[in-house]
């Protein structure tokens, strides 16, 4: 096999080459990279392979169905736990909100008392 390499105009990114492969004999009819000759398969062998493939599909589809059912059950079970978790979070948030409201009320009352005392002192002076 003869190999010819021609350098093309240089590109901004680097060099560019053209590689030409040609057979050493011009009479060569067989291409060296041709696929190997396959043996002929019998009808029985083809049927056996088809049956095996069908069996694999059945097993895989059965496993897939079981997997989907397991995921569905997990989602259903998880949703009940999720609702419990959400309600628990909601209760915590409500408690925090009530605490904040309570502290704001007490702070407001203390501020009012302080203001009244300050006003009382101002009036007394």
Image (spheres, rainbow, N blue to C red):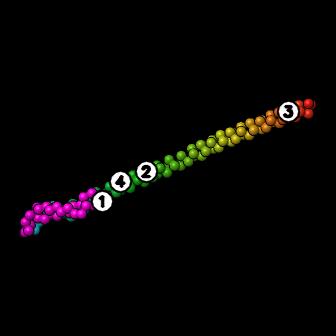
Q: How far apart are marks 2 and 3 (CA)?
A: 74 Å
Quadrant hosting residue 113: top right
* Secondary structure beneath label 3: helix
* Secondary structure beneath label 1: loop
Looking at the image, which residue is at 45% across and 52% down?
68
For marks 1 and 3 on the same chain, the one whose residue lies earlier in the sequence: 1
For marks 1 and 2 on the same chain, the one whose residue lies earlier in the sequence: 1
Badge nearest the viewer, 3 or 4: 3
Q: How far apart are marks 1 and 4 (CA)?
A: 56 Å
Q: Name the residue under label 1.
A: 12
* Residue 7 within the magenta-colored segment of the rendering: yes
* Residue 113 within the magenta-colored segment of the rendering: no
Q: Name the residue under label 2.
A: 67
Badge nearest the viewer, 2 or 3: 3
For marks 1 and 4 on the same chain, the one whose residue lies earlier in the sequence: 1
Q: Identify the magenta region.
A: 1-28
Q: Is residue 38 visible?
A: no
Looking at the image, which residue is at 63% across and 44% down?
87
């Amino acid at each position: 096999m003869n190999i010819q390499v021609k350098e093309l105009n240089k590109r901004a990114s680097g060099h560019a080459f053209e590689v030409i492969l040609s057979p050493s004999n011009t009479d060569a009819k067989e291409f060296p990279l041709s696929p190997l000759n396959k043996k002929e398969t019998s009808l029985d062998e083809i049927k056996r392979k088809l049956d095996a493939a069908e069996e694999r599909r059945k097993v895989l589809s059965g496993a897939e169905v079981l997997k989907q059912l397991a995921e569905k059950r997990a989602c259903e079970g998880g949703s009940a736990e999720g609702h419990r978790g959400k309600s628990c979070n909601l209760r915590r948030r409500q408690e925090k909100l009530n605490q904040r409201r309570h502290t704001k009320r007490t702070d407001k009352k203390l501020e009012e008392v302080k203001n009244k005392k300050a006003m009382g002192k101002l009036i007394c002076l």
